Image (cartoon, rainbow, N blue to C red):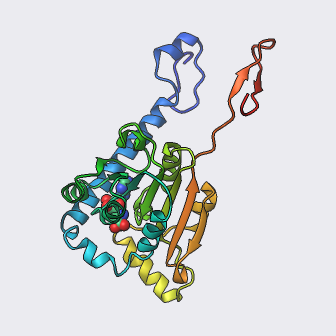
Amino acid sequence: MRGTPSPTFPFVPARWSAVQARPPPFALPAAIAFKRIMSDRNEHRAFLNRYYGISRHFYDLTRKYFLFGRDVVVRELLAEHWDSLIEVGVGTGRNLRQLHAARPGALLGGLDASDAMLAHVRARAPWAKLQHGFAEDADLVALLGGQRPERVLFSYCLSMVTDPVAALRNTQRALAPGGKVVVVDFSDLGGLPLLLQRGLRRWLATFHVRPLDGALFTEVGATTRYGFGRYYVIAELGAAKERPFVAPDAEHPGASVPVAPGS
Ligand SMILES: C[S@@+](CC[C@H](N)C(=O)[O-])C[C@H]1O[C@@H](n2cnc3c(N)ncnc32)[C@H](O)[C@@H]1O
C-alpha cells in the first residue's frame, strides 16, 4: 500500500508527511540495540554484585598471587608528574590507596560497575571521588567535578568490560591535554604452554574475564609491553586526537577551509 511504511528497513513512503508522522526508520533497530545494551548491563551488574558480594572481603589477599604487573604500573605512575587520576574498575581501591599514600594531595577518583565493590571502596577511601558507572560511557569529567583526569588507570578491569574499544575511546575523550590512559591486564597468554593457556582461559571465563588480544591495542593506537609468557600486558595511550577546526569560507558559504594551527 502506498504511503504505508514497510516494517523492514529501509522503507520509502509516498509523502514526506508520512515520514514525519512515524518514527524515523532507524528508531526501531536503535531501540532494540538500546534495550539489548541495557539488559546486558543489568546482567553484568547483577553478576558483578553476586561475584564480589562475598569475594571482596578476601579479594586483596588472593589477587596478589595472580594479578601481576599492578605494582609496576603504580610505581611507574608515581614516577610521573600528574595531579589527578581516575581508576576505572576501582575494585577494593587497592591501587588508589597506594597512590593516595604516596601522593596525598592528588585528586583521585574511582568508577565501578559493581555496587558491592563501590560500597567496599567507599568505606576504605573516603578521600576519593567515587561513582557507579560503566567504562564504555561513564562521564569521567563529571566524576572529578568537571576536571579532566591527567591519568586514567585500568587495572584488570578491561578484560571484564563488554566493549573494551568503546571503553578506551570514552576514556581518551575525557583525558586532560597531554594526559594518558594506562592499562594493566591479562594478555593473550601466547608465550605459555598450550595446555596452561587453555586451562587459564577456561578458568578466567568462569569469572567473565577475556584475556586482551593485541589487536585491541593496535586498533586504538596504544603502545604495549608484555610480562612473562605474555601473561599480562601494560598498554599506554594518549588523549583522542582533536580534528582541526574548520571555519566556513565567506565567499563560498557552502564550502569550508581548514584553519592553520595558531591562526
Ligand atoms: C578484577 S577487578 C580489579 C580491581 C582493581 N582494579 C584491582 O586492580 O585490584 C575488576 C573490577 O572492574 C569492575 N568492572 C567490571 N566491568 C566493568 C565495567 N564495564 N565498567 C566499570 N567497572 C567494571 C568490577 O566490578 C571490578 O571491581
Q: In x, y percent, where is residue 99?
A: 36, 62
The reply to whether residue 87 is in sight is yes
Q: Is residue 120 above or below residue 197?
A: above
Q: Is residue 201 above or below residue 177?
A: below
Image label count: 0
> In the drawing, does residue 204 fall left or right of residue 151?
left
User: In the rendered view of the protein, which quadrant contains the C terminus?
Assistant: top right
Residue at position x 56%, y 32% in the image: 9
Q: Quadrant of ligand 1?
A: bottom left
User: In the rendered view of the protein, which quadrant contains the N terminus?
Assistant: top right
Q: In x, y percent, where is residue 247?
A: 71, 22
Quarter of the image for residue 98 reads bottom left
The residue most toward the right is 251
- Between 44 and 29, the one lying in front of the other is 44
Quarter of the image for residue 49 reads bottom left
> In the drawing, does residue 29 fall left or right of residue 127?
right
Q: In x, y percent, where is residue 75?
A: 44, 70
Residue at position x 53%, y 10% in the image: 17
Q: Is residue 48 above or below residue 67?
A: above
Q: In x, y percent, where is residue 31?
A: 42, 35
The reply to whether residue 210 is in sight is no
Residue at position x 51%, y 44% in the image: 176
